[in-house]
Amino acid sequence: MYEDINSVIKEATEHFDRSLEHLQRELTKIRTGKANTAMLEGVLVEYYGSPVPINQVANITASDSKTITIQPWERKIIADIERSIFEANLGVTPQNDGEVIRLTIPPLTEDRRKDLVKQAKSLAEDTRVGIRNERHKILDFVKKEVKNGYAEDAGKRMEGRVQDLVNEYNDKVQHMVDVKEKDIMTI
């Protein structure tokens, strides 16, 4: 798990940073009522028999605050892109003019906005659970090291440092969710 007690904080920080990056990626996928190309990140298109991310077969741009434009590099895959968008269940209907696909983002209802905020808070709680689980691993390691001869007062200081780190990252998670909530609830 950990090489020694001195590497604990470094590894915990790296784990917590990865957790925050994952949360940020997941939060960008939540619709806010504005056109955001990130909502297409998980969409895979069948391209010559292989599933390929949509951004590898088309140019994707937000032409205005309500419209995403998808310009395929090959016209013959427009139907495949359109099918992939339907299957991704994004809540938008693609409009195909033979050369370009347009996604018009409908305005969100108040109930839908509240549901999206709940979804964002759920993602944040999952991240906090991951942070707490890592904290438990670290504290178990520190307790084991104390039993093996590491100074008890140094172990307590390490536990305090780990808790301070956990609190700092939980504050960052809360800030990210607050920003996303404000973005979702803004009309």
Image: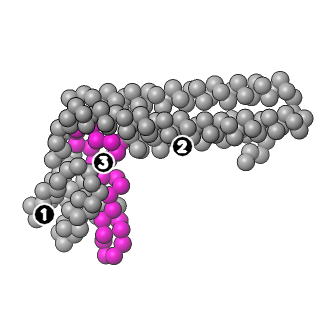
Label 1 belongs to which residue? 99
Residue 136: image x %, image y %? Answer: 68, 37
Res 34 → quadrant: top left
Q: CA distance from mark 2 to mark 3?
A: 21 Å
Magenta-colored span: 28-52
- Dot 3 amino acid type: Met
Residue that extends furthest to the bottom in the rendered view of this protein: 49
Q: Are marks 1 and 3 in contact (CB under 8 Å)?
A: no
Label 2 belongs to which residue? 18
Secondary-structure class at tag 2: helix
Res 63 → quadrant: top left
Res 177 → quadrant: top left
| Count of marks overlaid on the render | 3
Residue 79: image x %, image y %? Answer: 19, 68
- Dot 2 amino acid type: Arg
Residue 39 bears which disc, if any?
3
Mark with earlier residue (2, 3): 2
